[in-house]
Each structure stands twice: as C-alpha cells, then as structure tokens.
C-alpha cells in the first residue's frame, strides 16, 4: 500500500511539473493570431465610433446652419453672421474629414472580415464587424437614393452586404433585409402614390410622396419651360410629373406617360 501511495505521489508530481513546463512555453501561435485579430477588431471599432461622432457633429452643425439661414440677412446679429461663416467653413472641412474617415473604416472592415469570415466565422468580433459593415451599407444605400434616385444600385449594394452574413454562416441582419424590401417597394411608383400628387406641389413634396426620381429620368425643356420627372412602374412603362421651371411646382401629371421600352433602366 505504501508503494502504491508513493507511486501515485510521483505521478502527481510529474503531472504538475509537466503543467508548469507547458505554461512556461507561453501562448501558442494560434493564440497569438487570435489576439492580433481581436486587437485589429478593437482598432476598427474605435475608428468607426470616431466616424459616428464626426457625423453627429456634422448633423448638429447643419441643423444650426439651416436655422441661421432662415433668418433674413438684415436681421442677423454680428455674432450670428460670424457663426454662419464659421459653420460654413467647418462643414466644408468636416465633409472632407468624414469622407476620408469613411474610406479608412471601410478598408479596416474589409481587412478584418477577410480574416474573420475565413478563420473566425463564429467569433463575436466577426459578427460585430458584419453588423457595422451592414449599417454602413445602409448608410451608403440611403445616400445613393437621395443623391441620384438609383434604387437598383442601392439594393445591389445591400444585397452584397447580406451575402457576407451568408458566407459566415450567420442569420440575415434584419435591418438590412428590411431596407432592401423598403427600397424595392419605393423603386417603382404605385397608382396610390401617384394619385397623392397634386398640382402646385413642390419637387420636395413630390419626392416625399413617390420617392426620389432617378437622375437619368429627369428631362428638361427650357424652350417650353418644363421639367419632366419619369417614374418606372413595376408592370412596365412610366408615369410622369411635369413641373414649371419658373415656379418649380407641378402643373400636370400622366400615369400612362411613357411606353415600357422608352424608360431608362436604373
């Protein structure tokens, strides 16, 4: 019995010695690689938070600027005039900074997901990076629609973002799926929306009711003083709204304005 106990003690000592020896080797190559990936993810997240802070600053400045611009020039105080100049200059600088920061963040996300999807698809860092990428894709898609009315390009951009979730074996990101459905709905004019547009409405009012017009489907006729906005219908063809260039307001509309083959594809 004593010999058995002694043997057991020896085995335990050997196991403990082996454990200490294993610890002395330090982290494995795989552990170091994961740590580097996590550090890369943290850096990307910080850069993204900085970008969001800058965008919030721009939004606040734009709101203040718009309020000042509503005041008649002859009623502005000297302080307000100075603030107006400073805000205008700051917004010009911030726009450049925001674009640069956006490009940097996009590059960081791409680099991170290239590793994450292929090597760490189940890691929280990969999942978070995908959500950030999707949120930015939504931001870009909305900007595309506002600036050019290009719903198709915006939808394609979002669909590409959704494919990364599939590549990582993750469930679809609901805000992304919802935005794709929303833009697909607004890509085509409906009879209901068409009927809501009335004579005398401004361009902004029309866009709010039927969506942003695709930039290539805006036709101007200076000799007639008319600007035409064409909106594709899902069943084919296009409806049209006609604006007086002088007043920039609707004076007529036509649900059956254009045959299907003559409508520019967005």
Image (cartoon, rainbow, N blue to C red):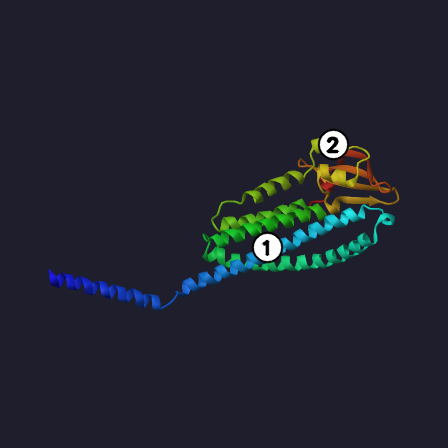
Residue at point 50% right, 48% down? 166
Q: Which residue is mark 2?
A: 196
In the rendered structure, the answer to whether residue 199 lies left or right of residue 7 reads right
Q: Of helix, strand and loop, which one carries label 1?
A: helix
Image height of 178 relative to 82, above or below: above
Q: Which residue is mark 1?
A: 49
In the rendered structure, the answer to whether residue 51 lies left or right of residue 172 reads right
Q: Of helix, strand and loop, which one carries label 2?
A: helix
| Viewer can see residue 237 | no
Q: Residues within 10 Å of mark 2 (few under 14, many from 20)?
A: few
Quadrant where the image shows the N terminus = bottom left
Residue at point 68% right, 49% down? 144
Q: Nearer the viewer, residue 233 or 182?
A: 182
Q: Quadrant of residue 188?
A: top right
Instruction: Pinpoint residue 264: horizontal percent, then vertical percent.
Output: 72, 44
Q: Earlier in the sequence, mark 1 or mark 2?
A: 1
Q: From mark 1 to mark 2, how far is it between C-alphas?
A: 41 Å
Instruction: Pinpoint residue 183: horizontal percent, then vertical percent.
Output: 64, 42
């Amino acid at each position: 019995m004593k010999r058995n106990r002694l043997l057991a003690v020896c085995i335990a000592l050997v196991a403990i010695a082996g454990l200490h020896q294993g610890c002395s080797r330090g982290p494995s190559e795989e552990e170091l690689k994961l740590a580097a990936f996590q550090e890369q993810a943290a850096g990307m997240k910080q850069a993204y938070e900085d970008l969001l802070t800058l965008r919030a600053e721009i939004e606040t400045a734009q709101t203040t600027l718009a309020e000042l611009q509503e005041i008649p020039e002859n009623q502005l105080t000297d302080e307000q005039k100075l603030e107006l100049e400073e805000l205008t200059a700051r917004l010009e600088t911030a726009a450049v900074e925001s674009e640069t920061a956006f490009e940097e963040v996009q590059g960081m996300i791409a680099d991170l997901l290239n590793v994450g999807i292929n090597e760490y698809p189940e890691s929280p860092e990969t999942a978070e990076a995908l959500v950030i990428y999707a949120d930015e894709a939504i931001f870009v898609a909305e900007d595309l629609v506002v600036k050019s009315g290009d719903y198709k390009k915006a939808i394609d951009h979002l669909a590409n973002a959704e494919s990364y979730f599939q590549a990582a074996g993750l469930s679809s990101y609901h805000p992304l799926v919802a935005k794709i459905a929303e833009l697909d709905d607004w890509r085509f004019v409906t009879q209901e929306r068409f009927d809501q547009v009335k004579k005398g409405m401004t361009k902004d009012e029309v866009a709010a009711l039927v969506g942003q017009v695709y930039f290539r489907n805006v036709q101007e006729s200076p000799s007639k003083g008319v600007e035409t906005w064409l909106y594709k219908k899902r069943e084919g063809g296009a409806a049209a709204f006609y604006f007086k260039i002088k007043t920039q307001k609707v004076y007529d509309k036509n649900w059956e304005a254009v045959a299907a083959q003559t409508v520019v594809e967005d």
